[in-house]
Amino acid sequence: MDRLNQKLIEKLKKSGERITPIRRALIENFCNHPKPQTPQELLTNLEKKGLMANKTTVYRQLEILVQIGIIQEINFSDRSKRYELSSKDHHHHLVCQNCKKVEDINLDNDLDRQEKKIWKKNHFKVLQHSLEFFGLCNRCQ
């Protein structure tokens, strides 16, 4: 088990939650596949590992992992929820509208300046923001 995986399992233990096979497999999955994933993709990956769970169970486990701060929920404007590790640096996403592939992208000027302008002009404190680019990936063009 790699260090990140072990660190996240320890965080789960310290929160008072049990380390069930499903939770362990979900954490492993996020460590091994860092791109944002849908609950259906996660369910499919669990089934490939021989772990049987239904959608409700997966959603319940994801909710617990979000509350603990292990993963974060990402809501794309295409109304699909995806999940990824919380420990990643702030970044944005490229979403292919054809194959649904999602790629992380870091922007050089990561909107910090814009948030400061918003505060100065509107006295609005930005707590978080979301920016996704929708289009066609290289394979789908």
Image: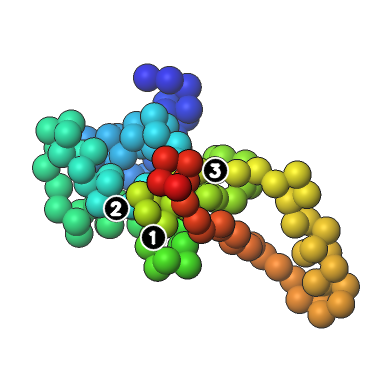
Disc number placed over residue 50 in the picture, else none: none
Which residue appears at 39% of the width and 60% of the height?
81
Q: Residue furthest top?
A: 1
Q: How many marks on residues?
A: 3
Rendered view: 47 above or below 130: above
Q: Earlier in the sequence, mark 3 or mark 2?
A: 2
Question: Residue 137: x, y in percent?
Answer: 47, 46
Disc number placed over residue 104 in the picture, else none: 3
Disc number placed over residue 81 in the picture, else none: 1
C-alpha gap between disc 1 and disc 2: 8 Å
Q: Residue furthest front?
A: 141
Q: Nearer the viewer, residue 16 or 94?
A: 94
Could you say whether the residue bearing mark 2 is in a helix, strand or loop? helix
C-alpha gap between disc 3 and disc 1: 16 Å
Q: Quadrant of residue 124?
A: bottom right
Residue occupied by mark 2: 39
Q: Quadrant of the N terminus?
A: top left
Question: Residue 131: x, y in percent?
Answer: 60, 59
Which residue appears at 22% of the width and 46% of the height?
43
Amino acid type, callout 3: Asp
The reply to whether the C-beta atoms of the residues labelled 1 and 2 are less than 8 Å apart is yes
Amino acid type, callout 1: Lys
Question: Residue 127: x, y in percent?
Answer: 67, 65
Which residue appears at 63% of the width and 47% of the height?
90
Classify 10 Å Cα crowding around label 3: few (below 14), some (14-19), many (20 and above).
some
The reply to whether the C-beta atoms of the residues labelled 3 and 2 are less than 8 Å apart is no
Q: Quadrant of residue 105?
A: top right
Question: Residue 111: x, y in percent?
Answer: 75, 57
Please indicate whether residue 112 sits to the left or right of residue 23 in the image.
Answer: right
Please indicate whether residue 43 sits to the left or right of residue 91 in the image.
Answer: left
